[in-house]
Image: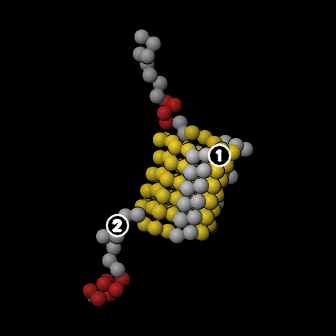
Amino acid sequence: MFNKFKNNSSASLPALISPNTHVTGQIDCDGELQVDGKVTGDLKVSILIVGQHGEVNGNITAEKVQIKGTINGNIDAQSVHLEITAKVHGDVAHDTLTIDGGAHLEGKLTHKQAPDNITPIKEQANAQ
């Protein structure tokens, strides 16, 4: 009787760590997390957005990551977008990667998909 109408609109709202907030510990989130404050600890999320003044000190595992702030740790994600104000100090494992001009990255880039559709330059030159 009371559950006749379900309001699922809150399921689409991102979790938010606001400015002037510091969270310490591991965070697991099945949905979207937006970090505008500071997180010290590892993150395992579906979608992560780090705002321009946001900071993460720990490793990130996600499906999609959009960085405008600072990351001190490794990133493992299907899709990674480093925007112009991004500062990443760590390795990035990705399927797709976008780096805007001005973004700062110190670390190793690793493409996670098998390179079966990539022809090495030497083989390509010999075929011609």
Q: How far apart are marks 1 and 2 (CA)?
A: 35 Å
Nearer to us in this view, 99 or 21 = 21
Residue that badge 1 annotates:
24
Q: How many marks?
A: 2
View extreme (top): residue: 1
Can residue 13 be seen here?
yes
Residue 111 in percent (x, y) is at 43, 66
Who's the residue at 57% across and 46% down the image? 26
Who's the residue at 44% across and 22% down the image? 6
Q: Is residue 55 above or below residue 8?
A: below
Viewer-nearest of labels 1 and 2? 1
Amino acid type shown at disc 1 = Thr
Label 2 CA crowd tier, 10 Å (few <14, some 14–19, many 20+): few
Who's the residue at 47% across and 63% down the image? 93
For residue 70, what is the image quadrant?
Answer: bottom right
Q: Is mark 2 on a helix, strand or loop?
A: loop
Between discs 1 and 2, the one toward the N terminus: 1
Can residue 68 be seen here?
no
Name the side, left or right, on which 18 lies relative to 108: right
For residue 16, what is the image quadrant?
Answer: top right
Residue 7 in percent (x, y) is at 47, 24
Judging from the image, the colouring scheme is secondary structure
Q: In this view, does 117 lie above or below 14?
A: below
Name the side, left or right, on which 67 lies relative to 121: right
Residue that badge 2 annotates:
114
Nearer to us in this view, 25 or 100 = 25
Residue 127 in percent (x, y) is at 26, 86
